Amino acid sequence: MTARYVHGACAHIDPLAIAHNLRRLREYAGKGVGGTGPSFWAVVKADAYGHGLDHALPGVLAADGLAMTSVADAYRCRAQGWTKPILLMGDRLTAADLNDPVLYPLHLVVQDAWQLEQLERFSGASIPHVWLRFAGKLNHAGFTACDYPAAYARLHALFIAARVAGIGHLQHYARADDAKQLALERHAFTELTAGLAGHHCTENSAALLASPAIAAQTQWLRTGIALYGVSPFSGNCASAWGLKPAMSLQAPIFALQDVQAGEPIGYGGAFRSGRRLRIGLVRCGYADGYPRAVRDGCPVLVRGRKTRIVGRVSMDTLTIDLTELPEVRPGDHVTLWGSGALPVEEIALAAGTIAAQLLTGLTAQVARRSASGG
Ligand SMILES: *Cc1c(COP(=O)(O)O)cnc(C)c1O
């Protein structure tokens, strides 16, 4: 292994953690090794939730399919050697895409009239599997309860004519983190699809973890955030389910600064210490995607010990208190989130946002590296 000094922030991605999380989630869904239970779509949209598709793929090899929102990502997965099904959630494919055997086995989420018409016009050598999407309470895409039966009937006609390979039912919950609302959303879907043949694909990370026994009765799950070792619920961490964080964000200390008592640190002079402080300047800021919204005291880890951010996060620098850590030197790497001791959920809470926004908000200047922590 060549040692190379990393000049900026780096996200270390652990595919073994993702593989571990997938196994855990399968256990929750009642499908241990060799058992029966739902199949898993591993959701890899948004560049695998910011982890980088190429880095995440080795971790999801045991999934039954990959779900994503852009056809460009589907081609990337195929180029990386993924041969199992791909589920495209919402992208509009061209006829050339639909005809491209490379994309098959291909599953499409059908969520609007345009897509229905396209499928009715399409006749190619390969035929896609379709999932009809209910708008539900999310109302981002999909057919309303009024339009759903007619859309199903049109797809069913295509199925009879062997022009689609199968039809399933799909919904994406608006409030899977609220048990009562989740039950209502599930109930509405059960009513809507009663008597219509086809597998169900409704459960995301939150729904699966909230009620595994119910999720286990569906045929395909779509899990994203939990695969990356992050809790879908605010206020708790994924370690509560035995999930491991797949990303660790680190950045080097590039200089030290002694700041006298009473002197301000950072833009706006927003922080002032009552005593002399030894400050570490860390090469990471909001241009990397680190949230500016965190307050003084937000934790970081260095040499295995916790310390805190003092002063405002700036574009490419953040400042940490090293007064009690005299052994820390320039060149040492600071963990900003992602180890067991510093979950990204905690930083998200400090920043007033959700972990998924932090993960997907890392910018292109943050290097992604594969690293296996086991
Ligand atoms: C993002 C997404 C998922 C995955 O949701 P998680 O909460 O990350 O598990 C599932 N289905 C659809 C339609 C999505 O957009």
Image: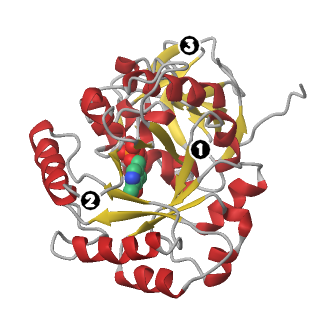
The residue to which callout 2 is attached is: 196
Between 361 and 278, the residue placed more toward the observer is 361
User: What residue is shown with label 3?
Assistant: 304
Choose the circle earlier in sequence order: 2 or 1. 1
Q: In the rendered structure, which amino acid carries the disc numbered 3?
A: Gly
10 Å crowding of disc 2: few (<14), some (14-19), many (20+): some
**Residue 292 appears left or right of 6:** left
**Where's residue 161, x and y in %?**
49, 75
Q: Nearer the viewer, mark 3 or mark 2?
A: 2
Q: Is residue 265 above or below residue 277?
A: below
Which numbered disc, 3 or 1, marks the residue closer to the eye? 1
Q: Choose the circle earlier in sequence order: 3 or 1.
A: 1
Residue occupying the point 63% across, 57% down:
105
| Three-letter amino acid code of the residue under disc 1 | His
Report helix, strand or loop for mark 1.
Answer: loop
Q: Is mark 2 within 8 Å of ligand 1?
A: no
Marks 3/2: CA distance?
A: 56 Å
Label 3 close to label 2 by CB (< 8 Å): no
Question: What is the CA distance from the residue labelled 2 to the residue labelled 1?
Answer: 38 Å
Q: Secondary structure at mark 3?
A: loop
Residue at x 51% of width, y 69% of height: 164
Looking at the picture, the colour scheme in use is: secondary structure
Q: Residue 226: x percent and y percent?
A: 43, 34
Examine the rendered structure and indicate whether residue 347 appears above or below residue 360: above
User: Seen from this angle, which residue lies furthest front?
Assistant: 160
Say if mark 2 contacts mark 1, CB within 8 Å.
no
Question: Residue 51 shows which numbered tag?
Answer: 1
